[in-house]
């Protein structure tokens, strides 16, 4: 598959694609992205609205009672682990948000994907976060192999896509995966990519 054809099509479909997690302060993005593991951004936005309204600063969050955080984020699943991570992140970010992936990944619950989202969103650095949509689409359109893990897919995409376009392309792929190239019943009839895996 010619990646330029995919880029052109996604530019037509989603010229203004952006991060769908709500946040008003930088540290909130780190927490929201960590919370988005194994759930939807929509679900995360619902709980962070409550969480960040109740705990309005990093300091208040780092002093919060873990049981109260667990209660608030319960709908997301893995709530005990995630509540523990929230407290750890709140304490770990007291001196600001790191600018490197290595530093970010020292925070609890922050792996490569979360770190990539944060660096791209907050600092506009050319990182690409491979979520479930990006992994599925990359395999379907043939820029990744079925056996490739997210790190391998990330490396392949970084080699293929111009750095200047990487962040937008990341958001576009996610939109495309939510709306057209869905996990179940992809809407191939209306998709212009017409990959060999279309149904
Ligand atoms: S043709 Fe179907 S499977 Fe291929 S990219 Fe389009 S929606 Fe996805």
Image (cartoon, grey):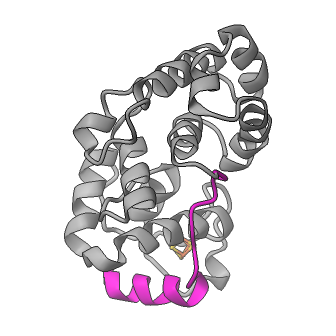
Quadrant in which ligand 1 is drawn: bottom right
- On the image, which quarter does residue 7 sit in? bottom left
- On the image, which quarter does residue 160 sit in? bottom left
The percent position of residue 8, horizontal first and vertical second, equals 44, 90
- Write the residue at 62% across / 24% down: 61
- Write the residue at 64% across / 24% down: 60
**Left or right: where 11 falls relative to 4:** right
Q: Quadrant of the N terminus?
A: bottom left
Q: Quadrant of the C terminus?
A: bottom right
**Left or right: where 61 falls relative to 42:** left
**Left or right: where 87 falls relative to 119:** right
Would residue 47 be visible to someone looking at this image?
Answer: yes
The percent position of residue 165, horizontal first and vertical second, equals 35, 78
- Write the residue at 37% across / 60% down: 123
The image shows residue 72, relative to residue 80, as above or below, that is below
**Left or right: where 174 falls relative to 125:** right
Residue nearer the viewer, 158 or 144: 158
Would residue 147 be visible to someone looking at this image?
Answer: no
Q: How many marks?
A: 0
Residue nearer the viewer, 146 or 126: 126
Q: Is residue 75 magenta?
A: no
The percent position of residue 36, horizontal first and vertical second, equals 59, 40
The image shows residue 199, relative to residue 115, as above or below, that is below
The image shows residue 39, relative to residue 185, as above or below, that is above
The percent position of residue 110, horizontal first and vertical second, equals 40, 33
Which residues lie in the magenta part? 1-23
- Write the residue at 65% across / 11% down: 66
Q: Is residue 4 magenta?
A: yes
The image shows residue 84, relative to residue 118, as above or below, that is above
């Amino acid at each position: 598959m010619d990646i330029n054809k995919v880029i052109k099509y996604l530019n037509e479909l989603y010229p203004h694609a952006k991060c769908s997690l709500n946040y008003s302060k930088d540290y909130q993005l780190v927490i929201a992205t960590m919370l988005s593991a194994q759930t939807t951004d929509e679900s995360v936005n619902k709980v962070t609205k409550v969480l960040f309204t109740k705990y309005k600063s990093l300091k208040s969050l780092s002093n919060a009672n873990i049981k109260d955080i667990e209660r608030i984020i319960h709908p997301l699943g893995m709530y005990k682990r995630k509540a523990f991570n929230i407290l750890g992140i709140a304490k770990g970010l007291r001196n600001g948000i790191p600018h490197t992936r290595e530093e970010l990944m020292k925070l609890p619950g922050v792996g490569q994907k979360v770190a990539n989202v944060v660096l791209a969103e907050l600092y506009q650095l050319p990182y690409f976060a491979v979520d479930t949509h990006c992994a599925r689409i990359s395999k379907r359109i043939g820029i990744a192999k079925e056996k490739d893990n997210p790190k391998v897919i990330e490396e392949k995409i970084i080699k293929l896509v111009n750095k200047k376009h990487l962040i937008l392309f990341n958001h576009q792929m996610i939109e495309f995966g939510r709306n057209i190239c869905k996990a179940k019943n992809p809407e191939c009839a209306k998709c212009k990519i017409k990959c060999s895996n279309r149904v």
